[in-house]
Image (tube, rainbow, N blue to C red):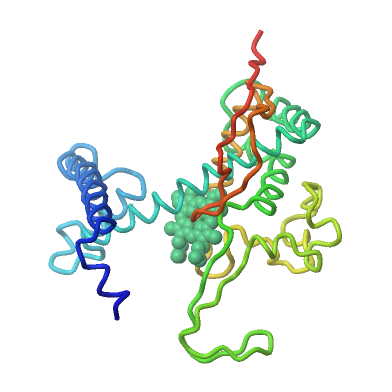
Amino acid sequence: MFVKLIRYLPTEKNLKIWKLDKEVRSMLMNIIKTRLENKDTMGYGNDLLGLMLEACAPEHGQNPILSMDEIIDECKTFFFAGHDTSSHLLTWTMFLLSTHPEWQEKLREEVLRECGNGAPTGDMLNKLQLVNMFLLETLRLYGPVAVIQRKACSDLEVGGIKVPEGTVLTIPIATIHRDKEVWGEDANEFKPMRFENGVTRAGKHPNALLSFSSGPRSCIGQNFAMIEAKAVIAMILQRFSFSLSPKYVHAPMGMITVRPKFGLPMVLMSLEM
Ligand code: HEM
């Protein structure tokens, strides 16, 4: 009861949360307002926001498929679910490429062979098999989402254990990802080739890799995240060789997403003559 009530009291923390919420809402409202004003000439836009605005359009009358509040909530969900996760996947990929220079070289060769020096197309990115395996191994060892939770909607049994309705189950993704029973004796080693025969065959269970969760509520943005990461890494490899700065201190820290506590200082060298 107390926990619920405290959310409505004007504490310092709540005042900050409310202020930030107001700012984010007003930023989103400005984007939405511009879309609505230009609707007759440019339509609602050919992206997710455009689709959601269609679902809220006046032709749906009193019963729009989505309300304006729901649209704003969806925008916030997509921004927060898609931004830090993707940026930390890139961070850890850069870290592992720096600590495994032989892989950095192999991946650069693959990128230059499949994409040349120009901006990679979707077809080119699909051919980057080593980059793909490297990203999967990064997600296994340094996946941005370390734990997820589920609440039992009814009494159930999981692996012979009775779970009463309402119990919150924590799924320790990061721990499962380093479990020797699941991945073999080399579970703690960085070995992208374990994904050579596909994600489902890399561990002892086809769903062993849980970086994007699994099942109906798994990450809706996972294909986008992978293609985005491939594009960014390919474009960096085309232009730079890099290593860790001596100032780097290894301290992965879980704060919603897993990040390097003291950042990732790096030394980049341009490959352009
Ligand atoms: C490396 C990048 C990413 C990782 C590791 C990741 C991971 C995850 C995980 C583990 C979940 C399940 C959360 C849970 O069940 O509690 C999830 C859900 C979700 N993700 Fe991602 N995600 C990534 C990128 C993205 C991107 C780019 C987007 C959007 C463009 C996105 C949108 C979402 C949304 C909307 C959900 C909620 C889906 C639902 O509840 O049905 N994610 N993500």
Answer above or below: position of 69 versus 90: below
State whether residue 136 is above or below residue 262. below
214 vs 52, left or right, is right
Residue 35 image point, x, y percent: 22, 42
Instruction: Give the vertical position of 64 relative to 32 (above or below).
Output: below
In the depicted view, which residue is nearer to us: 261 or 70? Answer: 261
Identity of the residue drawn at 80% across and 47% down: 191
**Residue nearer the viewer, 187 or 75:** 187
Q: Can see residue 209?
A: yes
**Observer able to see residue 223:** no
In the figure, residue 81 lies in which quadrant? bottom left
**What residue is rendered at 55% in x and 54% in y?**
254
Residue 203, image x, y percentages: 77, 62
Q: Residue 228, percent across and down?
A: 54, 40
Q: In the rendered picture of this protein, how many numbered marks are placed on residues?
A: 0
Quadrant housing residue 104 = top right
Q: Quadrant of residue 238?
A: top right
Question: Residue drawn at (56%, 90%), measured in percent from left and top?
Answer: 156
Q: Quadrant of the C terminus?
A: top right
**Residue 12 placed where, x, y %?**
25, 56
**Outermost residue, right direction?**
185
Foreground residue among 70 and 43? 70
